[in-house]
Image: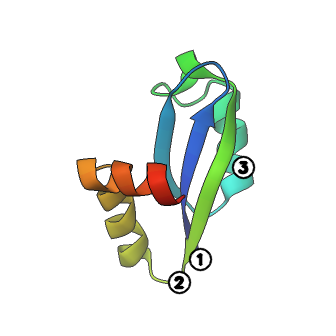
Amino acid sequence: MKFVYILQSLCGEHWYTGVTSDVESRLRKHNAGEVPHTSKFKPWRIKTYVAFTDEKQATEFEKYLKSASGRAFAKKRL
């Protein structure tokens, strides 16, 4: 199972989208500063996540959410 997740920074209007097989473990890594891209905006909380049985579909959905139309969709719907 793969999960596409959206994190929201608790110290501002920063968002992060990623894909993982363990959402809670990944969140701990983001909050521990182990992910260079997100370390300066911690702490983070899970805004939402979506489960996929197909890794390719998860990767494609993550890519979509990182596009301009995907960010608009996520902001409005997720």
Residue name at image x 73 percent, y 39 percent: 28
Identified by mark 2, the residue type is Thr
Tell me the element at label 3. Answer: helix
Pointer 1 with pointer 3, Cβ within 8 A = no
Q: Residue furthest left?
A: 68
* Image position of 50 (left or right of 16): right
Q: Which residue is mark 1?
A: 1
Residue name at image x 35 percent, y 50 percent: 72
Identified by mark 1, the residue type is Met
- Location of residue 46 in the rendering, given as x and y in whole percent from the top left corner: 67, 47
Tell me the element at label 1. Answer: loop
* Image position of 33 (left or right of 4): right
Q: CA distance from mark 2 to mark 1?
A: 5 Å
The C terminus sits in image quarter: bottom right
* Mark toward the start of the polypeptide (2 vs 1): 1
Q: Which residue is mark 2?
A: 53
* Mark toward the start of the polypeptide (3 vs 2): 3
- Location of residue 50 in the rendering, given as x and y in whole percent from the top left corner: 57, 68
Indicate whether 51 appears above or below 46.
Answer: below
Pointer 2 with pointer 1, Cβ within 8 A = yes
Tell me the element at label 2. Answer: loop
Numbered circle sitting on residue 25 = 3
Identified by mark 3, the residue type is Ser
Residue name at image x 64 percent, y 48 percent: 47
| Count of numbered labels shown in the rendering | 3
Q: CA distance from mark 3 to mark 2?
A: 19 Å
